[in-house]
């Protein structure tokens, strides 16, 4: 029963199109980052964002309350960046353009970017919910990168 429910849940979640982001931090010496699809706007007053990180993510070991956390929402042509930041052991920042903005690594050519500070870390099953206060944001006219049915794509306006 549990295996059937898990398989059905996975199939249901594959049917939900999700924006793709690379979440980044800077520990004072070097940048760190990981690809995520589970993030959302949490509150407008105060401005807050939520990111869900796998408990095995190396990035999670770098985060504490007060840590800088950048959410780089990828543009449609950045599926290679999503794959790079999902690959363990890769030198992720060597091959791409980025800069420190509001204390957070901001990747080049993204659809949108949000700088935050971690306000709390909440264990939730095999993930940790990272609640963060927004300290900066920017957006561009590039189309967003979307993940659906295990494929990258984009949403094009009609």
Image: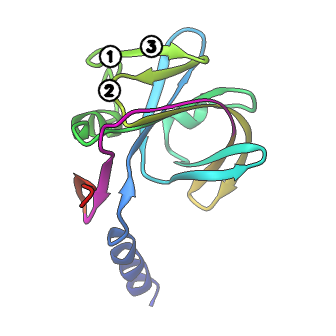
Is the residue under label 2 in contact with that under label 1 (CB below 8 Å)? yes
Where is residue 141, by image quadrant? top left
Estimate how packed mark 3 is, as few (under 14), some (14 to 19) or many (20 or more) residues with alpha carbons within 10 Å. few
Please give the residue where the numbered disc 2 appears in the rendered image.
Answer: 109
Q: Which residue is mark 3?
A: 99
Asked if residue 72 is positioned above or below residue 153 in the image, the reply reads above
Q: Could you say which is closer to the camera, residue 6 or residue 52?
A: 52
Q: Quadrant of residue 66?
A: top right
Residue at image coords 25%, 36%: 78
- Residue 130 in which image quadrant: top right
Q: Which mark is residue 97?
A: 1
Question: Which residue is painted at 33% across and 69% down in the image?
Answer: 14
Is 141 magenta? The answer is yes
Q: Main secondary structure of the magenta part?
A: strand
**Element class at badge 2:** loop
x, y percentage for residue 41?
A: 60, 51
Residue 40 in the figure: left or right of residue 21: right
- Mark 2–mark 3 Cα distance, whole angstroms, equals 11 Å
- For marks 3 and 1, give the CA distance: 7 Å
């Amino acid at each position: 029963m549990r295996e059937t429910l898990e398989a059905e849940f996975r199939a249901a979640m594959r049917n939900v199109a999700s924006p793709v982001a690379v979440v980044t931090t800077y520990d004072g010496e070097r940048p760190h980052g990981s690809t995520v699809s589970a993030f959302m706007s949490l509150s407008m007053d105060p401005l807050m964002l939520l990111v869900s990180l796998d408990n095995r993510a190396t990035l999670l070991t770098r985060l504490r309350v007060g840590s800088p956390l950048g959410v780089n929402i990828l543009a449609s042509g950045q599926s290679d960046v999503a794959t790079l930041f999902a690959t363990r052991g890769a030198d992720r920042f060597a091959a791409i353009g980025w800069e420190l903005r509001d204390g957070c690594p901001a990747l080049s050519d993204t659809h949108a970017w949000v700088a935050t500070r971690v306000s709390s870390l909440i264990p939730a099953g095999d993930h940790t919910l990272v609640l963060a206060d927004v300290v900066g944001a920017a957006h561009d006219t590039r189309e967003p990168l979307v993940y659906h049915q295990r494929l990258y794509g984009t949403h094009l306006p009609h």
